Image (spheres, grey):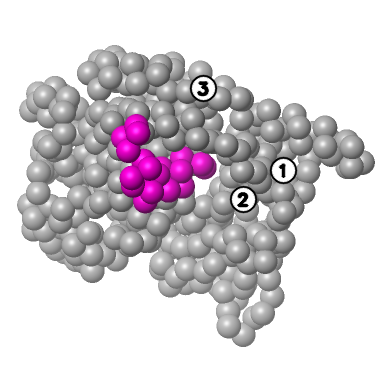
């Protein structure tokens, strides 16, 4: 269903960009594989043989791989009013818990490694460079995991007080056909300080599976940042470029962006949300990259699964404007009183998506910074001044900025800080 929606949401500009970047050609040459839900059929059969229920299956550390995504805790307006009326009671916080589940296994993926290597011009050379081969295998394997549908699990969330050793347990699931849970839980905590974080764990994982929750008070700054070609080199406009930077190379930050984000952190003290059209299978890879170069935050990825490896490339290039607008709309529901700084780039539909949300919530989004990507192919139309003027038509010129070097943005952030203190 999600894949059909992605096709339906594809914009004419995305169709044109996919052709220019050779996406259909490369996708057609990548190998197909068995449906990811085939593991669910086998899991159902195996549970019957073991005498267990076929309706749902509990998480088993020896059989399942589970990832818990970092998230943000928020309070809805009625909860804020209730907390103010009864300050002695623990505050109720909402947390959207996202988890994905796979089946343990070590399938032979050599033909997929060979296919990636062939597209990158490395075929026949991997034997001479085992580091690249190991890197491709490590990055590729999560895309080929068999998903675990109908899986249930429990998480334990600690108390916020050092004097309170209680742990709150919550049941999650079952996972959907893509092996994903997206479930909102309500939890009582006494946090009053913005950006306090705590770590929760998956029950039964020997504390090896964890998520970090950042508590966000209603007011303050919020940064919504794209990843690919905004803060990380991905070459999103070129199908082969995506394969190269994702599988064969070590991830690299965009020059100057780590220092700029450190400056934003010092000046605005924001809650950080990273929004990408990358598939959820890259969560561990992207989380490690963010933790190495940028301030930790909530990472939101596309929650769907494809039955062929070419679908990995479709995630970056089809329906990205509708996808990002939908997710930003959800973030607004969490933190509608925050002041928002959006950062994106010109390779995908960030200008159009951010402009769409500004028109919907003009008092919420205070600034939009778009990186003009000039060092990769197929960017002539995307970097045209007419594109930006059309995307931001009717939006005040002091709200949006197109930049090539992050040094251009420092004074703008200073201005946001000054306006905040004088408002």
Q: How many neighbours does mark 3 have within 10 angstroms: few (below 14), some (14-19), or many (20 or more)?
A: some
Q: Where residue 199 sits in the image (x, y, percent)?
A: 54, 67
Helix, strand or loop at disc 3? loop
| Res 15 quadrant in image | top left
Q: Where residue 173 sits in the image (x, y, percent)?
A: 69, 44
- The residue that label 2 is drawn on is 66
Q: How many neighbours does mark 2 have within 10 angstroms: few (below 14), some (14-19), or many (20 or more)?
A: many
Mark 3 → mark 2, Cα distance in angstroms: 24 Å
In magenta stretch: residue 9:
no
Q: Locate the C terminus by quadrant.
A: bottom left
- Where 1 falls versus 291 (above or below)? above
**Is residue 363 in sight in this rendering?**
no
Q: Locate the N terminus by quadrant.
A: top right
Query: Where residue 151 is drawn, which disc sits there?
Result: 1
Residue at image position (60%, 33%) is 178
Stretch of the chain drawn in magenta: 122-142
- The residue that label 3 is drawn on is 32
Q: Which of marks 3 and 2 is nearer the N terminus?
A: 3
Residue at image position (51%, 22%) is 32
What type of secondary structure mainly makes up the magenta span? helix
Side of 2 where 203 appears, left or right: right
Q: How many neighbours does mark 1 have within 10 angstroms: few (below 14), some (14-19), or many (20 or more)?
A: many
């Amino acid at each position: 269903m999600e894949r059909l929606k992605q096709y339906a949401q594809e914009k004419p500009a995305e169709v044109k960009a996919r052709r220019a970047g050779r996406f259909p050609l490369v996708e057609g040459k990548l190998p197909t594989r068995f449906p990811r839900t085939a593991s669910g059929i086998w899991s159902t059969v195996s549970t019957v043989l073991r005498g267990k229920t076929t309706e749902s299956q509990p998480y088993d550390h020896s059989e399942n791989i589970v990832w818990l995504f970092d998230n943000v805790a928020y309070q809805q307006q009625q909860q804020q009013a209730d907390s103010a009326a009864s300050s002695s009671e623990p505050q109720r916080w909402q947390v959207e818990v996202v988890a994905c589940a796979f089946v343990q296994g070590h399938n032979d993926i050599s033909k997929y490694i060979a296919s990636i290597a062939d597209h990158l011009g490395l075929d026949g050379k991997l034997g001479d460079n085992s580091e690249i081969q190991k890197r491709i295998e490590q990055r590729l394997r999560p895309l080929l995991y068999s998903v675990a549908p109908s899986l249930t699990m429990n998480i334990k969330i600690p108390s916020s007080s050092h004097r309170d050793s209680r742990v709150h347990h919550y049941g999650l699931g079952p996972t959907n056909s893509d092996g994903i849970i997206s479930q909102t839980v309500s939890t009582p905590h006494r946090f009053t300080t913005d950006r306090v974080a705590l770590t929760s764990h998956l029950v039964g994982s020997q504390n090896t599976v964890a998520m970090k929750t950042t508590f966000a008070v209603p007011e303050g700054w919020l940064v919504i940042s794209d990843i690919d070609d905004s803060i990380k080199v991905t070459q999103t406009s070129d199908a082969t470029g995506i394969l190269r930077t994702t599988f064969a190379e070590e991830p690299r930050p965009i020059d100057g962006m780590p220092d700029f984000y450190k400056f934003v952190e010092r000046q605005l003290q924001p809650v950080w949300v990273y929004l990408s059209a990358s598939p959820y299978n890259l969560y561990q890879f992207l989380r490690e990259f963010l933790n190495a170069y940028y301030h930790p935050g909530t990472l939101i990825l596309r929650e769907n699964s494809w039955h062929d490896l070419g679908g990995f490339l479709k995630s970056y290039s089809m329906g990205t404007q509708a996808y990002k607008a939908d997710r930003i709309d959800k973030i607004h529901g969490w933190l509608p009183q925050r002041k928002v700084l959006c950062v994106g780039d010109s390779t995908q539909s960030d200008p159009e998506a951010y402009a769409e949300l500004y028109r919907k919530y003009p008092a919420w989004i205070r600034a939009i910074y778009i990186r003009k990507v000039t060092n990769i192919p197929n960017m002539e139309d995307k970097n045209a001044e007419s594109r930006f003027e059309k995307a931001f038509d009717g939006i005040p010129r002091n709200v949006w900025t197109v930049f090539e070097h992050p040094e251009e943005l420092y004074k703008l952030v200073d201005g946001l800080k000054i306006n905040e203190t004088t408002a």
